Amino acid sequence: PYMLWLEKTGRFSFDEDNPVMKFGRQWEDQVRKEFSRRSGFEVTEPDQMFIHPDPQLSMLSANVDGIIQPNEKHDGRGILEIKCTLRSRIPVLAEWDDVPVEYKYQIMHYLSVTGLQYAYLQLYYRDQCTYSRPLLILRDDSMIGEMNQKLFSWWTKYVEADQPPPMESSE
């Protein structure tokens, strides 16, 4: 939380990618194309960052990897979230319980900000040069509501008040 506070208050910038992040960004287009080829869904790369439409939550933004266009399986648009990871990190991706907690929160955050109802998580295992089967993830309004309440509270207490949160041992 402290490092995030530094960034959100303009005291520090995390603009530079580490090598793993750089690899992921370089491979996003290829993974997006492969997901589209395998699923048959048209996927577009967004040309904008999304901002939450609720004025109280306008500090929340989302930079999604792809927008899935309406198709024979889904009436509305959805999100494609791409992760370039290691097989040892996520050996199986068959259900929600297999998804690392930080990915769960990220995907629900993106669904909240965009107002969309579903996402697909597509993994590319960079150590094996293989793809997972994509996992369909449906919007969970209960989880989103709890998350947004905590985010709003944190933003008000620390960012708007310009008060640093307590540092954690991992920072």
Image (tube, rainbow, N blue to C red):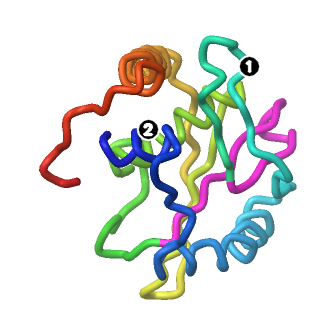
Image mark for residue 164: none
Looking at the image, residue 80 sits to the left or right of residue 135; the answer is: right
Residue 27 pos. (x, y %): 65, 78
Q: Nearer the viewer, residue 129 or 85?
A: 85
Instruction: Specify few, some or many for label 1: CA neighbours under 10 Å numbering under 14, 14-19, or 20 or more.
Output: some
Under circle 2, the secondary element is helix
Report if residue 165 lies within the magenta region.
no
> What's the amino acid at mark 2?
Tyr
Residue 41 pos. (x, y %): 82, 54
Residue drawn at point x = 73 percent, y = 19 percent: 53
Under circle 1, the secondary element is loop
Closer to the chain start, of discs 1 and 2, is 1
Residue at numbered disc 1: 53
| Quadrant containing the N terminus in the rendered view | top left
Looking at the image, residue 53 sits to the left or right of residue 145; the answer is: right
Residue 157 pos. (x, y %): 37, 17
> What's the amino acid at mark 1?
Pro
The image shows residue 117, relative to residue 34, as above or below, that is above
Tell me where the magenta segment starts and ends, as one range. Answer: 65-84
Residue at numbered disc 2: 105
Residue drawn at point x = 50 percent, y = 60 percent: 14
- Choose top left, top right, bottom left or bottom right for residue 162: top left
The residue furthest bottom is 128
- Choose top left, top right, bottom left or bottom right for residue 85: bottom left
